[in-house]
Amino acid sequence: MLIHSVIIILQEVFEAALIVSVLLALCRTLTISRGFFIPALFVAGLAASLYAINIVSIMGWFDGVGQEVLNSVLYGLIFIAIVSLFMSIGQARSSYAVSLSMSLCLIAAVVREGSEIIIYLQGFWGDSALIQSVVVGGFIGAGIGFSIGVFFYYLIVSLSVLNSLRICVGILILISAGMVSQTIQFLMQADLLISQAPLWDSSWWVTESSVVGAILSALIGYESTPTPIQVTAYIISLLISSSLALRSIRVYLKKSSIEHT
Amino acid sequence: MLIKQMLHLVGLSLLIMAPFLVVATPVQEIEIRNHLFYPSEFEIPAQTKVKLVINNLDATAEEFESYALNREKVIPAKSKGVIFIGPLPPGEYPFYGEFFPKTAQGKILVK
């Protein structure tokens, strides 16, 4: 039981920690205040608990697919937050808009992953035989996930400003497209979008259950059997995110080089 | 430029979501008891959409997970979850419970 809870909690914490560490590193690179971080985390924790506590009634919404609808909204929000973050970098009075977009991104990501952790743990509350190993495993998993986030953060901020900006923005572009693909996936599961046969099957190469698969899935939204709609939406989102990101980086670099001269 | 891009995106998604013919969807019920799926193996017709109703009778939550089907859903303790699958080509589609993967395993045979 212990090893399973390590893996389950690690997976959820890793996905959230990846986004949070990139956002915090980006703040440092752009010299934007991180004052929003603690309040946003607090709101996210509260919202994740509310989601987990009310999960059974949420599941009943929309004829039994409320969970899918809510999850696709959360994934959609992360995409919107990243896009609006890109739009606000380099703008006049950008720091306010950047903090707001980052808060939205952080809240949606933590609610999505955090609620699943709470639901998982909830089941063991009354089980005195299992709760101990689940909690210990959970702490180990959370510790590893958190450490990866911290490591990632310091790795990014140790780079030059230009390189760390490139890395942060690059990762966020990939994450944003992955989020759109996940949104589509949940809408299909809820039968709100037509289900299709997969476009390809790359599970012979990397399965999502492997470690590499899990990392790729968190980082670029890897899916071994994606449907044509998912692939199309992924490419469109990639184009939207990257064109916005490239433009704002150019504006930002121009602005900061003017300030420095 | 951006507004135009967004409008294209909205247009495309509306096109994709265009209403499709509504036919009665077959239902397959699955129970989770003591971290096991009942039935753990069952058949569904090929090229047909099927509604899985998963009834978790355990005191612990379970996550229905299938990479072959591209589906994942957390089913809290003592509750029912709905998952739509298919239309699928014939074949074997394994699934498992992510929270208790040692015991909770099953297979859908599409014929």
Image: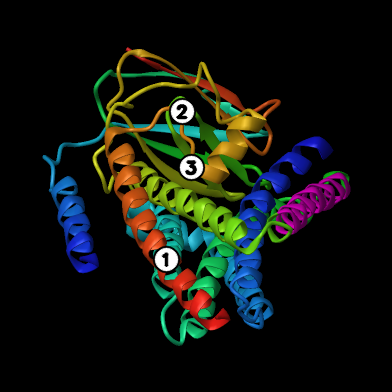
Quarter where residue A82 is shown:
bottom left
Q: Mark 2: few, some, or many residues within 10 Å (few <14, many ≥20)?
A: many
Which numbered tag is attached to residue A250?
Answer: 1
Q: Indicate the chain on which mark 2 is placed.
A: A
Which residue is drawn at the image coordinates 48% and 42% (left, top)?
Answer: A221
Q: Indicate the chain on which mark 3 is placed.
A: A
Element type where label 1 sits in the image? helix
Mark 3, residue position: A221
Which residue is drawn at the image coordinates 58% and 32% (left, top)?
Answer: A213
Element type where label 2 sits in the image? loop
- Nearer mark to the viewer, of 1 and 2: 1
Which residue is drawn at the image coordinates 33% and 27% (left, top)?
Answer: A198
Q: Indicate the chain on which mark 1 is placed.
A: A
Q: Earlier in the sequence, mark 1 or mark 2?
A: 2
Q: CA distance from mark 3 to mark 1?
A: 26 Å
Q: With respect to residue A93, does A130 lie above or below? A: above
Quarter where residue A185 is shown:
top left
Q: Mark 3: few, some, or many residues within 10 Å (few <14, many ≥20)?
A: many
Q: What residue range appears in magenta? A: A131-155
Task: Report if residue A62 lies within the magenta region.
Answer: no
Residue furthest to the bottom in view is: A93
Q: Mark 1: few, some, or many residues within 10 Å (few <14, many ≥20)?
A: few
